[in-house]
Image: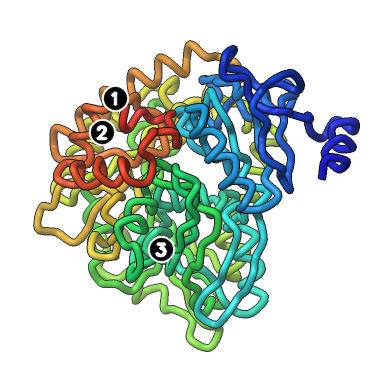
Amino acid sequence: METRRNVLAALGIGTLVAGFDPVTRAWASDGDADRVPPLEGTLHLDEPTRRADAQDAGRYLTRLPPAVLRPGSVADIQKMIRFCRRHRIPVAARGLANTTNGQGLVSGLLIENRSLAGIESIQADRAVVGAGTTWLELTKAAHERGLTPPALTGYLGLTMGGTLSLGGVPPAIQTGAQVDNVLDLEVVTGTGELVRCSATHRRDLFEAVLGGIGQFGIITRATVRLVRAPAKVRGHELTYTDQTAFFQDVRTLIRRGEISEIYGDWWRPGEHGGTVHLNAFTFYDKENPPDDAHILRGLTQSPDKAVITDDDYLPHVTRIDAAVDELRRVLDWDHRIKPWVTLWLSESTIEAYVRDVVPSLQPRDVGDAGFVLMYVHRRSKLTRPSLRLADEDGSDWVYLFTLMTSGTPGDVAFGKEMVKRNRRLYEKAYASGGRRYPIESVDFDPADWLRHYGERWPHLLALKETVDPDRLLTPGPEVFG
């Protein structure tokens, strides 16, 4: 093992680390440091590796980790968490870092979970996957067998460990979130214990980890639900300048339950007025194509005004990944400043919130390649208690409103300015019973998290003391101070 690590270091792939010096509070490659345990993977101190893990998708915050672990096994994670606990070194796991406000950044040990990628098995109703596996990888592999995960986010270049730690909200209206379609998890806690948990075993940990923002354990493996993949997707797009008509037609479509996905998008508000597009998609088998006039019956707009598309299922669910690849090519997408805000709003408040907020947005609030989205979900399908939703209002529908701001690469001041704006938008939503979906950019302190979790807070606080008593895991969001 020592020989392998020396070779990797010589090749510039890894940095040979003897241990951690508790006096200087620094990682060391020689001397009297407390030696790290033997690892199957590699521990890195070189600046290029650390610098690559110092930002997330927001690109306006930088936190340089002193050390980066690329685990060769789950045992490596256990060993290093125990080592870090001995020296009170904070730890965070990183998938593909698609949060935008430093949630997974750490001034301690950064664990790259992407090295735990791998599909272990695919069965008729489930798949067992490593936490570093992307949903795109699983979706393609499952589709070869005529299967699919039921809840797929618009963009699939996200890891299992990442989305399951946050929620994973799709445009599909009847499936719940990705966290609702998990059968069991393998988790390494803040004490280094490896735990298998599910709805019937260690349910408290299972429900806390799913959507728990990395506070209760590092996901290393997941068993997720699969269903039969539809063959085709029929799309219907309608354009509105009348917000009342838009919301009336959204409600008509979702209440009938005949469509599979729906979302609204406002493209560059502030330049194109209040124009909003309603996008509805219906999954179907080739033998039973949908009737367009039937699907669009009773709407405020004539069916002949709809833009109709037809696609195979796999190209449909991977189309955003293709679009992002194009944005990378033409707009340096990965380096753009992205201080997003994403909020849950109830049926009774969404329309008023949109009417107030969207017309107030300036081109600067959205930016090049930025946009505004609105998803709709059945509240009864969103079952994981750590995924906090807008206050109940008697309706089974709840809405996710997202302002996906995109700014010039390197403009950190713009990012910080937009984070302050996001706080104002969050407070406006919270005043009417809304909650944030914490993948995005709203600064929170422990008092904010207490009101975010409400009646669930005492339970989470007690569980934290049990599974991460030194509060080492994922300090970025400052959930527990």
**Is residue 94 found left or right of 450 in the rendered image?**
right
Q: Is the residue marked by circle 1 packed among few (<14), some (14-19), or many (20+) residues within 10 Å?
A: few
Q: Which residue is at a point 29% across and 57% down the rendered structure image?
A: 204
Residue, x 43% and y 23% (percent of image)? 363
Considering only order in the chain, which callout, 3 or 2, is on the residue closer to the N terminus?
A: 3
* Above or below 457: residue 129: below
Residue 79, picture quadrant: top right
What residue did someone put label 2 on? 449
Do the residues under discs 2 and 1 have CB atoms within 8 angstroms? yes
Nearer to us of marks 2 and 3 is 3
* Amino acid at dot 3: Cys
**Residue identified by numbered label 3:** 197
Looking at the image, what colour scheme do you see?
A: rainbow
Give coordinates of residue 123: x percent, y percent. 57, 80
Query: Residues under labels 2 and 1: Cα distance?
Result: 6 Å
Q: Which residue is mark 1?
A: 445
Residue 285 vs 151, above or below: the answer is: below
